[in-house]
Image: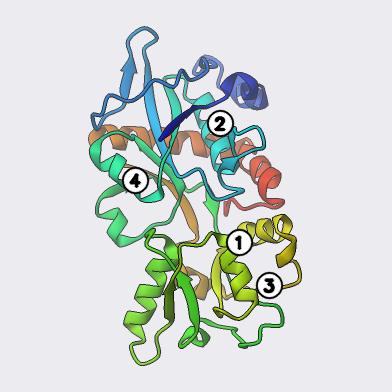
Amino acid sequence: MKKYPLPLAGLLLAFSGLLAGCAGETQASDPVTGAAADGGNSVTADSAAGVQQVLVGTSGAPKPYIYFDDDNNLTGYDHDVVVAIDAYLPDYEFTYEVTEFASIFGGLDAGRYQMGDNNFTRKPEREEKYLFGSEPYVYNWTVVVVAAGNPDHIQTLADLGGKKVYTDDSGGFAQIFFDSYNAAHPDNPIETIYSGADGAKQLLDLSQGVVDFSLLEIPMFDNYVATYSELKDKIDYVQLSQEETQQIQDPYGWFIFPKTDAGQKLADRVDEAIRALDADGTLVALSDKYFGFDMTGR
């Protein structure tokens, strides 16, 4: 696992308007040192500067939410939102550590991470163990990806019964939806096929009829088509009604925290920062930059 300090020195200028509006309350913090958390389930304090260190666990994917650029620097919408939060909260310093998706939860459980960032959606089984803030930072438009021409005539969730789809053991929203759908439709379940292939290979298989559909957020669909020429004009998507979209997953994305007093305190401060970033237009500006439209849902 690798840790990546936030590049505040080069990015604080982008948030100077916000900082100016909070004069007397906030000051620009120093670049993150990358110092590790102490392993306790609390935010750690830098004794020299009086600044509390927050180690954030992320998988570093998918693009454009969070990813590595051509210079191997962590970037993306989620990343830049956290940079803006860091700029707004001078008494905290946020550092990323890239790990496997499932290990984010383990890191929160063990007290290694004080915050998880991977566009998490609310699920009862997650809310039992982790804190979700009160302020989401993104709205995910989930769609059903199909082969061009939609040969299976998929239009609603009811059409997914009996269809084939790739799944994995990451515990992501799609796997959770497939399990719940099949539990509710035992006579006509979705046929899930385990695959360890990357997303581009899975979508190429879909375009060739190996599987019948996939589930993606619109920005991820757009990114795949723009990145992989072999997918252009080979796949399309069906946008569901808002009610059906919400059956797949809570469309809002959240940061998550350990269920501790320190976790609650940090969640409250992050909520405070998100409200400020919404009010001053930073969230919408970052959404336009990475998605091309307003994905904040606010």
Which tag, 3 or 2, sits closer to the chain's start? 2
Count neighbours of disc 1 (C-alpha within 10 A) and say few if under 14, some if 14 to 19, many if 20 or more. Answer: some
Residue located at (32% from left, 47% from top): 105
Q: Amino acid at mark 3?
A: Ile
Q: Is residue 280 visible?
A: yes
Q: Where does the image place residue 174, in percent across and percent down from the top left?
A: 45, 67
Q: CA distance from mark 1 to mark 3?
A: 11 Å
Label 1 with label 4: CB-CB less than 8 Å: no
Element on which disc 4 rests: helix
Which tag, 1 or 2, sits closer to the chain's start? 2
Residue at the top extreme of this rendering: 48
Camera-nearest residue between 208 and 232: 208
Which tag, 1 or 3, sits closer to the chain's start? 1
Which tag, 4 or 2, sits closer to the chain's start? 2
Q: Amino acid at mark 1?
A: Ala
Q: CA distance from mark 3 to mark 4?
A: 32 Å
Residue located at (57% from left, 54% from top): 297
Q: CA distance from mark 3 to mark 2?
A: 35 Å
Q: Amino acid at mark 2?
A: Ala
Position of residue 206 relative to residue 256, above or below, is below
Which tag, 3 or 4, sits closer to the chain's start? 4
Q: Where does the image place residue 27, in percent across and percent down from the top left?
A: 53, 15
Question: Mark on residue 152?
Answer: none
